[in-house]
Image (spheres, helix red, strand yellow):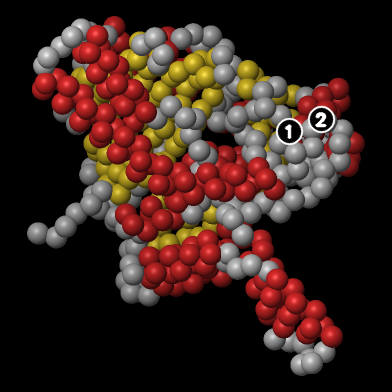
Amino acid sequence: MAPWYVIRMLSFSAEFPLKSGTPSDVLSCIATWLRGSPHRVLAVEDIEKLATGEKEKIEAKSQTAEVINLKGSTSVGLGAKHTAIDHGIIYSTTVVSRVWNDATWVSIRTDRASIDTHINLREAQKPQIIKLLLKHLKGGLDGELWVRDKPHLITNADQNMAIRLLNGDSDNHIPVVYLSRTFRDELACDPLALARHLGGLAHVVVEPSRSFSREIQPFTNSRNAYGGAVGVYLPTGQRSLIIPDNEDEWNVRKRASEVVRASLLTRLPIAGFSWADLEAEKSRQNIEALKVAGSTDLDAFVREFDAENQALRDQNEALKVEIGKLKTEVQNLNAVSSTSGAGVKKPIAVQDYFPGESEQFLKDAVEAALKQVVSGSRREAVLQEFFDRMRSSDEFLRRRKALKETLSSSDDLDAKATKLLQEFGFSITSDGKHHKLTYHGDPKLTFTMSKTSSDWRAGKNMASEIIKKIF
């Protein structure tokens, strides 16, 4: 029998604060979500027992739902996971709620898994639980903006706030989608529809007038979207710009949503908000309870230690992927100017996606220039001096080699290639017969790979195309 493996892919991620409520209130919303699902096969009475704590796990046919409730003196939080199997695809949605920065936060993540690389893994829809949370508990204050499913219509008096948001100087955790005005003071898309779609994922900020763009431009170093463009601004200071090109407003909204979702998939999660985090902490609480009770049940201790070790292994596996994102985040934070306060003009900074990226680009450019100069000339001497002083990036060379070797060995995305691409900052979505690979949420760096290519060189060609554009 041929070996099989599961390809697991994070397909949706969101984190935001709540205005009111506790983790227990979040569990009530989760129960409402499970009861109202059109695909529900779980018994309503079992869902009620899950919500009241009578049961920690319920099952019915191809669906399971389980809850972890932390009620210790040092660790308080709640997590719920719903898993369903449909036509060979495993869908798993996890909701974790804990107090962070003096407010109740929620993290929602959807994973999909398949044992067959040729099964179509469609883009995950926004979970209904987010709409329920915003409806019943309301979105909390994220930096200077309230989380909600309505647009923020700023005024001329909000210039300083707008500058902070666009420069990455605000304390917001979720992205900002900035709708600028055209020269006729029109918008490229419907802000109400966009805000409904991105509620809980991003703040939709609407510019008051065309003149507003010109007034804030000097203080954002021209990084503000203007003339009808739509800008997606991450808290780290990174920006993606969407310039409408004779397309309908639905497509503009779709493009903005894709950039936001891709950026959230590559963002580091809040520490302690993963299912593995809760499992490990729950096992530690259980072990401590056994000690306090003076238990001599060796089997009970072994079970809890095994559970904790498995959770820690899961955390370690996830961190292997996240470590690449962390390196990128550190580089971006170092690259963006740390100038504080609104109204201060900021210099443009190149944001490396990994250590030594920009310097390697410069060294390669100098090397190419050296091949074109007259031998023995002054220009050759100066360029050679620069070349010798510049360092090569080991990480740059490692990534280029790893991509080439891994992708060239297959004509489709297997588990190894998927894991490597995600580690390097690619978000992966599947649509019909193709995979779409987007590098660090940049739509200009999107690559399409067929799932069913008969060309044995498909992987090699894809590696070549990626290397040409990002290395």
Q: Position of residue 417 (x, y in %)?
A: 37, 58
Badge 1: how crowded within 10 Å, few (<14), some, or many (20+)?
many
Q: Is residue 234 left or right of residue 394?
A: right
Q: Position of residue 61 (x, y in %)?
A: 16, 28
Q: Is residue 107 left or right of residue 217?
A: left
- Total tally of numbered discs in the picture: 2
Label 1 residue SS: loop
Q: Are marks 2 and 1 in contact (CB under 8 Å)?
A: yes
| Between 411 and 169, the one nearer to me in the picture | 169
Q: Which residue is mark 1?
A: 169
Badge 2: how crowded within 10 Å, few (<14), some, or many (20+)?
few
Please give the name of the residue rendered at 82% of the width and 89% of the height, measured from the top-left corner: 377
Separation (CA) of disc 2 from disc 1: 8 Å
Whether residue 189 is visible = no
Label 2 residue SS: loop
Q: Which mark is residue 341?
A: 2
* Kind of residue sitting beneath label 1: Asp
- The quadrant in which the C terminus is found is bottom right
Residue 129's image quarter? Answer: top left
| Between 180 and 69, the one nearer to me in the picture | 69
Q: Earlier in the sequence, mark 2 or mark 1?
A: 1
Q: Which mark is residue 33?
A: none
Q: Position of residue 231 (x, y in %)?
A: 70, 42
Q: Is residue 61 above or below residue 391?
A: above
Please give the name of the residue rendered at 73% of the width and 80% of the height, measured from the top-left corner: 384
Residue 69's image quarter? Answer: top left
Q: Is residue 416 above or below residue 241?
A: below
Q: Is residue 251 above or below residue 397?
A: above
